[in-house]
Amino acid sequence: MRLEQNQESGKYYVGDSKKILKDSFFHNMRGKIQLILTSPPFPLNQKKNYGNMTGEEYLEWFASLAPIFAEMLTCRGSIVIEMGNGWEPNRPVQSLLPLKSLMSFVENNEAGLRLIQQFVCYNPSRLPSPAQWVTVKRIRTVDSFTNIWWMAKSDEPKADNSKVLRPYSNSMLKLLNKQNFNAGKRPSGHNISETGFLRDCGGSIAHNFFELESMDSKRKVRLPDPFNAFSLSNSTSNDFFTRTCKERRIKPHPARMHMALAAFFIQYLTDPGDWVLDPFAGSNTTGYASARLGRKWIAIDTREEYVEQSKIRFEDPVLKKPNGENL
Ligand SMILES: C[S@@+](CC[C@H](N)C(=O)[O-])C[C@H]1O[C@@H](n2cnc3c(N)ncnc32)[C@H](O)[C@@H]1O
């Protein structure tokens, strides 16, 4: 284990996260992490260029992480894991490995975890994959979403959906403005009170489906606040990190987490000053979003070149402005 980056807001270690988190050096962090937010190496059946494990070996390794992660959490802390889909090698058949891995992780008795809620992130700008079946043979549709699994040691981990509100719809804004609407029973059986919808709460409650690009061009996508604060266009191809990597001829990490997604969970599940850990941090999207939101972070990755490029994120002039909730 080597400490590679030491920022005021956090630290980046190079090495194997399982070994590092079990190291006596990390004992004092046990029970202090409020959120583990990560996208682990994918359970692929074919090796990708950052050295993934395959099949049963992956399953066992992934399940063995559950008690180590759980031990790091505060009693009301959360684990949020983003996982894409996988495919069987050379077959137009979806792999069950991601689901089996999740099951063996959450059901590992030594960890005492439960699934709190599933989220889906729809992202149509992902490249058509698996290309052989989608674009060459045209027998499968484009794999266009990732799953996000939120787990915890308690049924009631710290969470506050009023911190991640969506902008109100135009009809709701009109209704708040007019201060009257049709109270009474709806065909659905819901009984709407006289005043139920007249209080302005600053926005509507977030959904567990993130539409990064509108599925219907006639309908306005209303994503929660962090998606607006970490503006969508700024978080993909044109942000400070990607632009600077390009200028310095550095190949950015091929599987970066969506910045606004990281910001959403950090804001929703932690408070300023809390610790956020990403054990498979890559370009350190989690650390950067944590720093911008006034949280402390710990990042770990085996690959030095990712740690090196992640330092670019902390050259972003935005971080020089006073941080905290008001971005
Ligand atoms: C999907 S990527 C994470 C990308 C990251 N969320 C980002 O936004 O850049 C998974 C990362 O896990 C790292 N990794 C794989 N095995 C590891 C291990 N045993 N310990 C620590 N990191 C590992 C890989 O080097 C890779 O960068």
Image: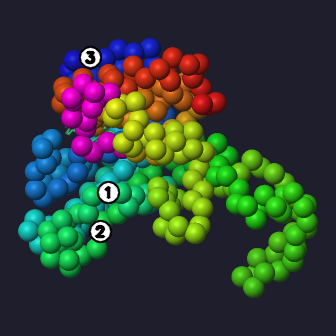
Q: Is residue 245 magenta?
A: yes
Relative image position of residue 274 (x, y in whole percent)? 52, 28
Question: Residue at (43%, 23%) from the top-left corner?
Answer: 316
- From which residue to which does the magenta span run? 244-257
**Please, what is the three-letter code of the amino acid marked with disc 1?**
Arg
**Sequence-wise first label, 2 or 1:** 1
Marks 2/3: CA–CA distance: 40 Å
Q: Magenta part mainly helix, strand or loop?
A: loop
The front one of 183 and 260 is 260
**Sequence-wise first label, 3 or 1:** 3
- CB contact under 8 Å: marks 2 and 1: yes
Question: Which residue reaches farthest bottom?
Answer: 187
Which element type, helix, strand or loop, lies under badge 2?
loop
Circle 3 packing at 10 Å, graded few (<14), some (14-19), many (20+), is few
Question: Residue at (91%, 66%) from the top-left corner?
Answer: 180
User: In the image, which disc is placed on residue 154?
Assistant: none
Where ligand 1 lies, by quadrant? top left
Quadrant where the C terminus lies? top right
Relative image position of residue 273 (x, y in whole percent)? 55, 24
Which one is in front in this view, the residue at disc 2 or the one at disc 3? 2
Marks 2/1: CA–CA distance: 9 Å
* Location of mark 3 (residue): 3
**Is residue 71 in sight in this rendering?**
no
Q: Is residue 312 magenta?
A: no
Relative to 240, say whether 123 is above or below. below
**Please, what is the three-letter code of the amino acid marked with disc 2?**
Val
* Location of mark 2 (residue): 142
Q: Tell me the quarter of the picture where residue 33 sits.
A: top left
* Location of mark 1 (residue): 126
Marks 3/1: CA–CA distance: 33 Å
Which element type, helix, strand or loop, lies under badge 3?
strand
